[in-house]
Amino acid sequence: MTNSKIKHRRPCIPHTGKINSSLRFGWISSNWSGYARASDKAKFRRISAEWNVPFVLPSSKSSYSSAWIGIDGYENSNLIQTGTGHDWVNGQASYYAWWEILPDVETVIPFPLSPGDRIRAAIYKINRTRWCITLHNLTQNWTFRTVQQYTGQQSSAEWIVEAPSVGSSISKMAKITPVTFKCCRLNGCSPGFVAKEKGIMIQQKQVVSIPGAPGPRGDSFVVKRNG
C-alpha cells in the first residue's frame, strides 16, 4: 500500500567530505546517500541498475526512504529518476514503485511491490527531448515503461538511497535493511565507482545512511542504515 502524504525528491547540494577520513567518502548530504558522478558536460544519456526492495523496520514516528537511479540533480536543479519507496507510516510499512521528473512530485506506479522483490531500472535518452523510464519487477514479473519530455543538463548521474521530502521538509530516514545496488551501468558501461563519488547522509549531526566501498568490478555497492 502507499500512504496519502505527497512525497517528492530534492536535488542534492553536497558538502565536500574528507577523502582520507576513516569513512572514505567524498560528499555529505542531508537527504542523499550513495554514489554520484558529475561532469561539466552533457555526457550522461543512459543509466541502469538492479536492487532488492529493502524491509522497513518499525519506528516510533513516521519515516520514509527511497532507492533510485537518476540523471541530474547533483549540484543542479533538474532530475529524471525512478525507484522504489519504503516507508513507515501510522504504525505500518508501505512499499511502492514510482517515477519523477522535477519539479513535479512523484508518480506512483500502480503495480504491486513487496520487500525482497528484485528490481531492474533504466532511464535512457531517445532523442533530443524524449526519454524512456523503465522499471521491471523481476520477482513479480511486471514491467512499467513511460516516455517523457526531459531537457535537463545531463551533467550528473546517481544511484541513491534518499530520505525524500514530505511537504516542504526533508523526512526522517526510515529504518531499512541494507540496499545493494548491482549491475550498475552508465552509458552502457560499468561506472567504475571510486571513493570520492561516495556520499553519506547526515541528519541532525548523526550519520544515518552510508554506502560501502565499490564491488570488485566497480559496478556495485551496499547502502546501510546506521542506527
Image (spheres, helix red, strand yellow):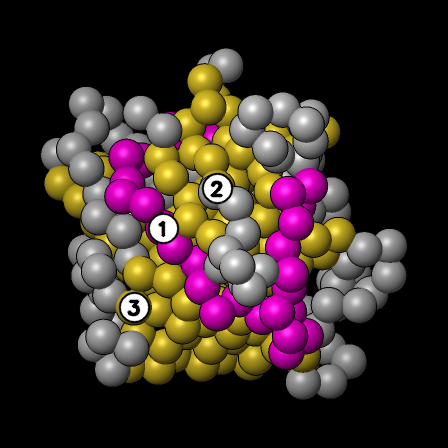
Q: Which residue is mark 2?
A: 211
Whether residue 172 appears in magenta in the rendering, the answer is: yes
Asked if residue 21 is positioned above or below residue 180 in the image, the reply reads: above
Q: Mark 3 and 2 residues: CB-CB less than 8 Å, in contact?
A: no
Asked if residue 128 is positioned above or below residue 65 in the image, the reply reads: below
Q: Nearer the viewer, residue 154 or 216?
A: 216
Q: Position of residue 48 (x, y in %)?
A: 53, 70
Whether residue 153 appears in magenta in the rendering, the answer is: no
Report the disc number at residue 118: 3
Disc 2 marks a residue whose amino acid type is: Pro
Disc 3 marks a residue whose amino acid type is: Arg
Disc 1 marks a residue whose amino acid type is: Val
* Residue 121 in the figure: left or right of residue 64: right
Q: Residue at x 23, y 75 (%)?
A: 139
Report the disc number at residue 151: none
Between disc 3 and disc 2, whose residue precedes?
A: 3
Between disc 2 and disc 1, whose residue precedes?
A: 1
Which secondary structure lies at badge 3?
A: strand
Tag 3: Cα neighbours inside 10 Å, few (<14), some, or many (≥20)?
Answer: some
Report the disc number at residue 179: 1
Q: Position of residue 149 (x, y in %)?
A: 65, 74
Task: Locate the N terminus and report the quarter of the image it occupies.
Answer: bottom left
Q: Position of residue 5 (x, y in %)?
A: 32, 42
